[in-house]
Image: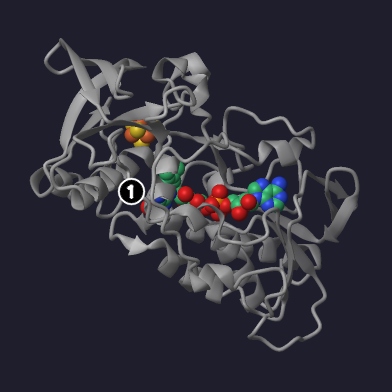
Amino acid sequence: MMPREKPYIKSNRQEIPAFAGMTSDAQPVTGNRQPVTVRVAVVGGGPAGMAAVGALAAMHIGVDWYEKEDRVGGKLNNYHQLFPDRVPASEAFGQLVKGTYHNHIDRHLGKAITSVGVNAGRISLNGKDHKIGEADAVILATGFDFFDARHKEEFGYGIYKHVITSADLETVFADGDKLLNVNGSAPASVAFVHCVGSRDEQVGVSYCSRLCCITGIKQAIQIRREYRETRVYNFYIDMRAFGRGYEELYREAQENHGVRFIRGRVSEASEDEQGRIRVKAEDTLMSRPIKLTVDWLVLLIGMSPSCSAVLSGKGEREKSFTNAENPLTGSAVKGQPGVFLAGCCAGPMSIPESVASGRSAAVQAAEYLNKKNGNSE
Ligand SMILES: Cc1cc2nc3c(=O)[nH]c(=O)nc-3n(C[C@H](O)[C@H](O)[C@H](O)COP(=O)(O)OP(=O)(O)OC[C@H]3O[C@@H](n4cnc5c(N)ncnc54)[C@H](O)[C@@H]3O)c2cc1C
Ligand code: SF4
């Protein structure tokens, strides 16, 4: 995501104690420091990485945990409430991070891993220009990157102040900021555009990012809860609300919060003299053009793969997610024995799915080490 000036006013961000507590000098609090013979490296400190390190430590496996930022939590650090139950992101973080205060886990914050190399059963972890560590197995949990909305020039992200992304809006809510109109009062209307940077051959992305529909529903409800008079429109291609409680939230958005869902494609956005956003769209159910002027346009950006860069070691990101050797049953990476994928670096998934994926990768890494050390058939 591009760095940008905050296009809204009134910051109320308060440091959440649970987030603030996880710094480079945080001390592990549980588990006896027993001698461990094997070590697994986990790269990434988001929900998938947190779940993986907790599960490994519980199996008495030593863990080196690398995170490129100076705190763990991943994208969760900038979220407000989570779909579908509106659990505060800080609460989810608190639950996840608890499992990582363990004596078998050594944290390495502020360490970006740029490549891994497999050699004679050992795996090296490398930084930009030097080796950072070694391990018997590695779990890559580097998550996803937000699609860069500037590639969809027709929507004017980075040009018009009142065009923002769903990631920006999540930060607005998390910081307790206000999404106000150009005169400093509550917005009269806000529109969401679905599928920005997903299912779009123009930008070379054919997959569905799976979570942006439900993110758009969650954020539309949040706006209606904060500003009862604001009209909210969601322009969608198909509504994909597949998970537990998602369909119910979609209904709630329509029936209890009056969010208007329009099956239609937005073709372009432009700014008027007052700084409001003019939207041109086509209602594909009614086959008629729509012109609408709104105070804010929110682009529901897709999720882009991140771990191809680490696996290739060349820093180049691919446009499709890295496939596991056998995606039906495992998360091992083809041709790289001892390397496993967890969370969104393997594909778009929700936080509960990322947590399950992190735990699953931990079990697979343990099985791999057992076999390698001749402890099982
Ligand atoms: C706008 C938006 C809102 C969302 N809201 C919700 C929601 O309400 N509920 C929900 O269930 N899901 C939500 N999601 C999905 C959620 O963000 C993901 O499920 C979750 O972040 C995946 O966790 P992860 O650990 O795989 O990746 P991430 O959260 O991306 O964490 C990856 C971590 O790895 C680190 N890292 C990356 N590369 C390296 C490297 N080379 N070396 C070391 N460290 C590295 C990163 O700094 C980061 O800390 C939302 C997604 C979007 C786009
Ligand atoms: S989840 Fe919805 S908005 Fe996201 S790519 Fe799929 S269909 Fe489009």
* Horizontal arrangement in the rendering, residue 64 relative to residue 263 (left or right): right
Toward the top, the furthest residue is: 288
Which residue is pictured at 65% across the width and 55% down the height? 44
- Secondary structure under tag 1 reads loop
Which residue is pictured at 76% across the width and 49% down the height? 113
Query: In the picture, residue 281 is in which quadrant?
Result: top left
Image quarter where the C terminus lies is: bottom right
Q: Is residue 229 above or below residue 290?
A: below
Image quarter where the N terminus lies is: top right
Which residue is pictured at 21% across the width and 33% down the height? 189
Q: Which residue is mark 1?
A: 178
Toward the bottom, the furthest residue is: 32
* Horizontal arrangement in the rendering, residue 221 relative to residue 124 (left or right): left
Query: In the picture, residue 316 is in which quadrant?
Result: top right
| Residue type, mark 1 in image | Lys
Coordinates of residue 231 in the picture (x, y in percent): 16, 36
Coordinates of residue 79 in the picture (x, y in percent): 43, 54
